Amino acid sequence: MTAGNPGVIDFYPPFLTAIHSKDKSGTLAILSHSHVGHDPAVGARDLSATSRNPFIYALPFQIRNALRVFDSLSTCFGINTRIVIAGHSVGSWVALQVLKLRSAAVSGVFLLFPTITDIARTPNGQLLSRFFRPPFPRVASQIARVLHFVPPTIICRLFPKYPVAQAMVLRSFLLSPSSIFAAMTMAHDEMLNIRELDIATLDKYQHQIWFYFAEKDDWVEQGREKILQVFRADPSTVRVVHGHRDIPHAFCINHGEELAAQCYEWLVSGGFV
């Protein structure tokens, strides 16, 4: 599982646990990881050092980390193991890069709410992209120090739709200056570099790709039509689900069960379990 942004994997256990609990074969194992620098639990970095080299949190670095994880799995479990990558939001873009570079070893890719084209032109991209540019990541990360004085109950009140466990994950992230800096720095790189749709990759590996789109998604918007246009000539080859209108882009907060049911259905229909 490759997370979105912020790439804190602690947002995803309800979703991942729900998938695993559905399996009766005993052959399904799930590995998930945060993006480099995003997880407060991993340990804070010196911001004075990272601000001099913010590109250690940029997309190429995250791709390299995802490849290391994938290669470790392949080495550990052997070439006969079927590996399926699930990517959420920008994690879908990272997953596609792994597919492109390790296509022979990737059995399938589940792209959930995929932000894989023109993210800066989406409604949210146009609204927020300016705040990801320097010096905003550093300024925002310093403001995080003040939040240590905000009690957890205030976070729960500010985010009433969050289950308590998810609100505490959010609080932990907001209290970590290095995590905020990493997430915003990566978001800036997303705005700059996730532009033209990689039509060649989608076309070449269409039999290995599954999509899940929200009915309304301000991080995807017109990108959905561009993606679907790639498969118009042969619609039978692509597996696309258009989600219920109540399931948002940030599904992992309180709609993990619904997405887990869909992903497990894909695992079964694809012959992966």
Image (tube, rainbow, N blue to C red):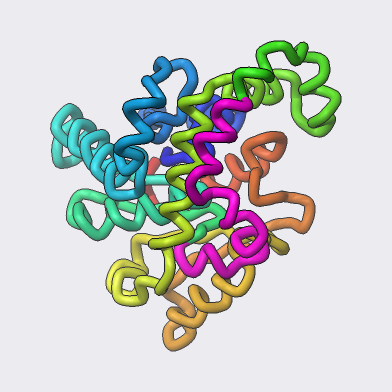
Q: Residue at x 58, y 40 (%)?
A: 260
Which residue is the extreme one toward the bottom? 233
Q: Nearer the viewer, residue 129 or 230?
A: 129
Magenta part, dominant SS: helix
Q: Quadrant of the C terminus?
A: top left
Nearer the observer, 56 or 260: 56
Question: Which residue is drawn at the image coordinates 57% and 69% (left, top)?
Answer: 121
Q: How far from the left and from the top, in percent, is residue 117? A: 47, 67
Position in image of residue 116 (x %, y %): 45, 62
Residue 20 in view (yes/no): no
Q: Is residue 1 visible?
A: yes
Could you say where residue 244 lies in the image, as x and y percent from the top left? 74, 56
Q: Quadrant of residue 193?
A: bottom left
Q: Is residue 193 above or below residue 15?
A: below
Magenta span: 116-143
Above/below status of 146 relative to 186 = above
Q: Give how far across and how far down residue 32 sits, in percent.
A: 41, 31
Magenta-colored stretch includes residue 106? no
From what the image shows, is residue 111 above or below residue 157? Answer: below
Residue 126 lies in quadrant: bottom right
| Residue 130 lies in the magenta-colored region | yes
Judging depth in this view, the residue of 200 and 190 nearest the camera is: 190
Q: Position of 99 compared to 221: left or right? A: left
Residue 49 is left or right of residue 232, and the answer is left
Query: How many circles with numbers are drawn on the protein?
Result: 0
x 37%, y 20%: residue: 46
